[in-house]
Image: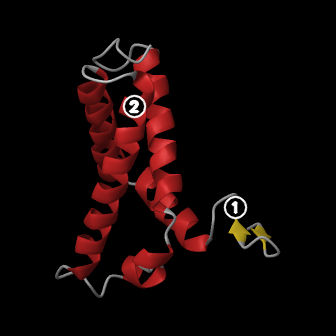
Amino acid sequence: MTCDCKNNRYQGYANRETWCFDLWLNNSEDLYTMWSERTEELLEQLADKLSTQDAVSLTNIKLNEEIRTWFRDYCSSEIKNNFLCDMMPTGTIDYPHIVRKLIDEAIIKLAEGEGDSDDLQ
């Protein structure tokens, strides 16, 4: 495990909680698919109406709010004694970092023709 304690970074992430959250999302096929598909969906919808840069910016804003709200709701549900929620306080996760990764992956996937849209190529 790499901790850049001087800069308060962990494994290239803002902190351990962000690294752990990203690891969880990427290692759960259902969660990864859900958020990857949602990212592609937003990009495709917005690319039909806006410039690519504006579509990416708006996707970033919407996805940040959606993923933050989803995790907060997940942790306050009946599973609130979940070990994962205890390990990752929602206020310490760098959601913009997570969302940037999702958007970057979606743009690459769409540009390679794996998605349903040619708008972001």
Left or right? Give the position of 10 relative to 87: right
Q: Are marks 1 and 2 in contact (CB under 8 Å)?
A: no
Question: Which amino acid, by three-letter code, is at mark 2?
Answer: Asp
Question: Which amino acid, by three-letter code, is at mark 1?
Answer: Gln
Q: Quadrant of residue 3?
A: bottom right
Left or right? Give the position of 33 relative to 110: left
Q: Quadrant of residue 90?
A: bottom left
Q: Which residue is mark 2?
A: 54
Q: Earlier in the sequence, mark 1 or mark 2?
A: 1
Provide the secondary structure element on which disc 1 rests. Answer: loop
- Give the label, 1 or 2, closer to the camera: 2
- The x and y percentages for residue 26 are 45, 51
- Viewer-side residue, 78 vs 73: 73
Residue 107's place in the image compared with 74, above or below, is above
Q: Which residue is mark 1?
A: 11
Q: Residue at x 44, y 77 (%)?
A: 91
Colouring: secondary structure
| Mark-to-mark CA distance, 1 and 2 | 30 Å
